[in-house]
Image: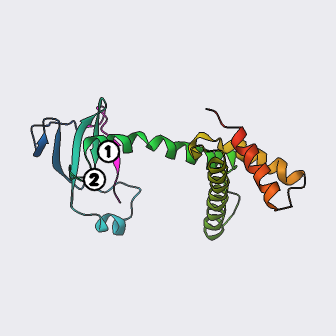
Amino acid sequence: MDGVFEQYGARKRSTDFSKGEKLDPRDHLIVLAKPKKPDWMSQSAYDQAPATVKVRELYAGGKILVTTFVCPKEAPKTVVKALYRSRWNVELDLRNIKTTLGMETLRCNTPEMAVKELWVYLLAYNLIRLLMAQAALLADQIPRQLSFKHTVQIWIVWQQRGGGTHDAVSINALLFLIAAGSSP
């Protein structure tokens, strides 16, 4: 799995662009050694991790980014920077699952049931995102412009008011209400 992270100055290591394999003045490849096993990690999981990992450190957008996308031709600075900036959507999505859908606390008592509960939340999340995508298409908008919370609220009210009919007119009315709550 690849990732893009910000290099924080408060951490023990800092970036020295004069070391490693230089790609540009503020872009290089370095090899990181596996740290000692943290207390929370099992020995078998630790043993499965590689002894070293090659990462790319680059300066983009006023930040030093660390990524496993090591090829500058496949992942130019602009792409890595855009990917890092898009992480905010992940934060919002997690907040929507936890807060808007009410998953702050899992209610199941066994690990097996907790996993099933997580899958139900993810299914609900994706179904709501599907509604949002359909509403955005109908209204010629971008799905991310629509409000997740508004969509959930409209769906709940629609169901309570007899939204059991699934004809094209009813569905289009629902999608129009979802799109109407977007912020430009």
How many numbered badges does the structure rendering display? Answer: 2
Nearer mark to the viewer, of 1 and 2: 1
Q: Tell me which residue sits at (84%, 54%) in the image.
A: 159
- Above or below 98: residue 14: above
Is residue 8 on the magenta stretch?
Answer: yes
Residue 70 numbered mark, or none: none
Estimate the spatial distance between the alpha carbons at disc 1 and disc 2, rounded to whole Å.
13 Å
Q: Main secondary structure of the magenta part?
A: loop
Cβ atoms under marks 1 and 2 closer than 8 Å: no
The kind of residue tagged 2 is: Thr
Using the rendered view, name the quadrant where residue 36 is placed: bottom left
Disc nearer the start of the sequence (1/2): 2
x and y percentages locating residue 102 in the rendered image? 70, 49
Q: Tell me which residue sits at (32%, 63%) in the image.
A: 46
x and y percentages locating residue 71 in the rendered image? 21, 53
Is residue 159 on the magenta stretch?
Answer: no
Decide: few, some or many residues near mark 2? Use Cα within 10 Å; few <14, some 14-19, many ≥20: some
Residue 79 numbered mark, or none: 1
Q: Which residues are magenta?
A: 1-12
x and y percentages locating residue 79 in the rendered image? 32, 45
Look at mark 2 in the image and give the residue it sits on.
Answer: 68
Near-viewer residue (139 or 87): 139
The kind of residue tagged 1 is: Val
Placement of the C terminus among the 4 image quadrants: top right
> Element under label 1?
helix
